[in-house]
Image (spheres, coloured by chain):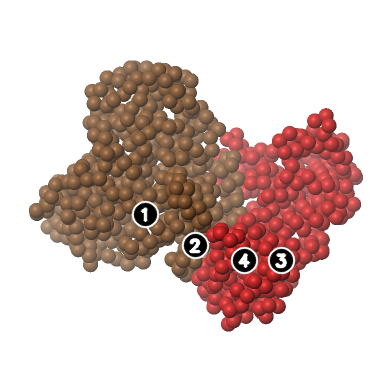
Amino acid sequence: MLRTQVLIIGAGVTGAGLARDLALREIECILVEKQDLNAGASGANHGLLHSGARYVASDPESAVQCRIENELLKRLAPHCIEKTGGLFVSVEGDDEKYSAAFPDLCSASGISALPLTAREAREREPMLTDRITAAYEVEDASVDPFRLSLSNVHHALSLGAVFLRHCEVTGFEIEKGLIRRVRLLDASCGREILVETQQVVNAAGAWAGSIASLAGASIPILYSKGTLLVTGQRLSHRALNRLRPPSDGDIVMPGGTVSILGTTSIRIESLDNIAPTVSEVDLIVEESKALLPSVETTRFIRAFTGVRPLISQTGKCNDRSVSRGFGLLDHFSDGLENFTTIAGGKLTTYRLMAEKAADLVSSRLAGTKPCLTGHEKLPDPPACRWTEPGSSPKKWFESGKLQTMMLCECEMVTAGTVDIIADCLRETGEKPDLRALSLRSRIGKGPCQGTFCGAQVTAYLYERGLSDSNQGLKELREFLIERWKGIRPILLDMPLAQAELQEAVYCGFLCLELPDSGDMESLTISVESIVNGTC
Amino acid sequence: MEHAEIIDCELAVVGAGIAGMAAAMFASNRGVSTVQIGRTGEIAFASGLIDLMGVHPVEKNRISENPWSAIEALVKYSPEHPYALLGKRKILDSLNETIQFLEPFGLNYQSRGENNSLIATPAGTLKPTYLVPSSMWSGVQSLKDKIRCTIAGFQGLKGFSPRQMANVLEHRWPGLQPVTISFPVASCAPEIYPEQLALRLDLPEQRHHLADLLGPNVRNTAAVGLPAVLGIYRSEQAIADLEQFLGIPVFEIPTIPPSVPGIRLKEAFSAGLLRNRVRLLHQLRVLDVAPANGMKFHLKVGRKDPELIIKASGVILASGRFLGGGLHAGKNGIRETIFNLPVRDPVVRESWHHMNPMDPRGHPINRAGLEIDENFRPLKKSGVPAFENLFVAGSILANQDWMRMKCGCGLSIATAFGAVEAFTASGLR
C-alpha cells in the first residue's frame, strides 16, 4: 500500500504540469498513467503554442488565456519553445467577412496581429500560395509537447513526486463521500497496487469520463477525433493558419526539422481502436494545398490521431464551436468531497489548468503554499532533450564526439543518447524498454519508421543487459505495431516501398508474425517436430 | 542518343534481383544470347537462404514441415498461385540447376532431404527455410540437436546481439554462450559494417587474428556461431580455416540487411553470367520501351539519359515490387512502371493493408501484381497476353505473398525457369 496526499490520474501535459505544481507547493503526489507520458491528446497535436488568434471569434475567453500563457511559457520554458511566429492567411474563396473582422477581434483580446500584403507574406514564407487575399502576422510559436511533459515530470520527481507508468486505475474505495483508496493494476507485472490518498485529481483527458464513472460521478464529455500528418521536411518557418472559421486542414505547423499538417475533426462515440484513416489523410492534403500547393508532392512520414476531450454544452453541435476552454469540476454534486476533474483546454493553457486544479486541491489541504509555476523557470534536464525533430544530429555534431555508434540512422540517435535516457529511466526505477526510449527520443520517427533502428536498439538493449528473456522481442513487436498505425494511411510511393522493406525484414526474414513458443499449442507441436525431426 | 550503342540480342532480362539473375542464368545456360539490365542494390537484402514454402496456410501461421506437400496443398487451395504453373519436377529442376551454377563460385547449399529446416535468426526467432548455405548448416544441426554453442558477435556490428539470441532462444536452444569480441576494422570507428568485416576476413591473417580472439571464449562449447560476415569471395576457406584453428564447427547466422550472403549471391551470379557471356548492364535502368507484337522490343537504357538501345526478340520482366521499382503505388492505384501493364489491384486503398502489421492473413496489397497465362505472359484486362514476347518472373507476380508464405527465393527461381522455358519454346528466338 502506498500513501500520498494527492493522486493524479493521467500523465498528459496537464497531469505532468499538476504534479510539478503540487510538488513546488510541497504537496506529496503520485502521478499514475495507464500507458506512458502524453499517450493521448497531449502527444497527438500540432505542437502549436497559440497566440490566441485562432479563437478570437469563436471563444474570446480562450483567446485571452492563450495570449497570456503564450507569453509566460516563452519566458519560463524557453527550451521547449521555438519562437517561430505565425501567419494567418486567407485565400481566394475564403469567407471575406471573417478576415475583415479578424484584426478588430484580435485587438479586442489584446492579441497583436500585424497586417501584411500578399507579397510580404510570400517573402516571409516563399512556399505559400499565390492566391492570398489577406494575411496577418501573429505571435504563434512551436512547442515540443514531449519535452514539456518530460521536463515537468522530471522536475516533479526531483521534488519528491512519484510517477507510476503503465498503471491503470481499476477502482475507488469510497467511504461517506470520500475516496479513501485507489486501486491500480500494474500492467508490467499484473500486480494490484493500493494507494491511500487524501485527494484525487482526474486529469485523464479523453478518458476522464470513464474515470469519473468509476467513482460514481459523471462528466458531460464529447470526443472529437483529430488526425494530423507529419512531413519529411519542414515546409515553413512560421506557423501557418488558414484565416477562416476553424475547419479541417487549417494549420501547417513547423516543429524542428518537420512540419505537421492538420487536423480533422470527427465526433466519435468510443475511444477504442483510434487510428488515422486514408480518407482523413487525403482530406488534410487536399485542404493544406490551399495554403501550400507543394504539399501535393511532399513526402509524408506518418499520420497520427488524438482525441480532443471537449466539455459539452447543450445546444451546440459543431465540435469546433464547443469551447476549447477548460473545465474544473469539484464533483460536490456527485456527492464526492475529495475528487476533482480537470478536463478540456489545450496544450497552450496546460499550466493555467494545472494551477487552477492545484489551487482547488490545496484549498482542501491544510497549510499549503501558493502556485509557483507562474514565476519559476521550468528546468531543462539532459535526459529530456531528445524529442525535438532534428535536435539529435545537432547535438551530435556540437558534441565533437563524432565517432559514436548511431543506433537510429534516420534521426541520428546515438548509443550515448540511448544510455542517457535509459539511465534516467532506471534512476526512477523504470524499465528502459524500446517504447519508453522511442517516446523520449526520435527513435523510429524517421523515414524508415523503425525498420533498422527497431532491430538495432533491441539488440543494443540486450547487449547492455537491459532486456532479458523474450521481453525485448515482445517490445519490438509492440513498437512496430504502434508505429504501423501512423504509417498505414500514408502508404503510397516511397513510404510504401519502405514499408515493404520493413515487412521483408520483420516478416519475410525474422518471422516476427509467427507466434512465440507457447503462444499457440499447434505451432509449438509443429515447431518441435521440425526441430526434433520427428513429425 | 544518335551515338548510343545498339545491342542486338535474343532476350533482355529486366531486373537484377534473384529472379532476374536466375532468368539470365537459365537463358544463357540454354545458349540464348542475353542482356541483363537492373540495379543490384536490393539483392544485398537477400538473406542467402532459399525459401521454397515455409508457411501454409498463412492465415493459420502453420509452419510447413515439408515444402513440397505445402505447395501441393497450396495450389489446390489457391490455384492462381504461380507455383501452380510449374509442378514439383520443374521447381526441383530449377533449384538444382541454380545450385550447380553457384557451386563453382564457392556457394553450396544443403537441406534436410525434401524437408524444411529451422534456422535461428539474430532476433532469436526461428525461420523455416528449404536450402541453407553450407556456411550456416552446422547451426541448423546444432539447433536441431540442442548442442551447446557459443554465439559470438562483434563490437560495433549493429543489430546482432549474441545475448539477445541466448535470451530469446533459452528454451529452444539451451546453453548458448554469448560473447562479443572487439575486432576493429578501422582504427577509430566504433561502428563496423558487415561488408567491411567480410572483405577483411577474406584475408588469411585476419582469420588467424579472429581465431586468436575467439579461442579463449569457445572452450566449453561444441560449436561457434558468428554473424554471416566470414568472407565474401573466400567464405568456404574462411570457415575451414576458423574450424581448423578452433577445432570445432563454425557456422554463420544470417543477418538483417545489408547481408553478406546476399552480396555473395550477387557476385557469384554475376561471375557465372559473365562466364556465360551475358551482357550485364547493372546499375542501368530501362527508361523507355517501344514494344511491338511479333517484332523486337526496343529498350532505351541508361542512368538518367538513354545510353544504349537494346533490340531484343523477347523480354523477361523481373523488376520486383515496390521496393525494387517494378510497381508503383499512387493515389489512382498501382501501376507497372515499364510496360504500363495492368496490375491486379486489391480494391480500395483503405483496404490495401490490415490494421495490424502482423495480421496472419498478410496484407491484401501483397497479392497485387501481374497476372500471367500458362506461358508466363502478362495479361491485358481482357485476359489475353499483352505481348507475344513478354514474360514475367519473380515477386512482381500477383496471387502470392512471399514474405508470409516464406517462398521468396524459390518463387523467383522457379518462375524465372518457367519464363525462360516459355520463351525458348515459343520459337521467338
Q: Residue furthest left?
A: A367
Helix, strand or loop at label 1? It is helix
Residue type at mark 2?
Answer: Tyr
Q: Earlier in the sequence, mark 1 or mark 2?
A: 1
For the residues tagged 3 and 1, is the chain the same? no
Q: Residue at x 46, y 30 (%)?
A: A288
Q: Mark 3 belongs to which amino acid?
A: Leu
Q: CA distance from mark 4 to mark 3?
A: 17 Å
Q: Nearer the viewer, mark 3 or mark 1?
A: 3
**Do callouts 1 and 2 point to residues on the same chain?**
yes
Q: Quadrant of the C terminus of chain A?
A: bottom right
Q: Residue at x 28, y 49 (%)?
A: A379
* Tag 4: amino acid: Pro
Question: Residue at (23%, 23%) from the top-left corner?
Answer: A108
Callout 3–callout 2 Cβ contact below 8 Å: no
Palette colour of chain A: brown
Q: Nearer the viewer, residue A329 or A521?
A: A329
Q: Which residue is mark 2?
A: A460
The chain holding disc 4 is: B
Q: Chain of mark 3?
A: B
In terms of secondary structure, where does tag 3 sit? loop
Q: Which residue is mark 1?
A: A383
Q: Which residue is mark 3?
A: B203
Which of the labelled discs sits on residue B227, or is there none? 4
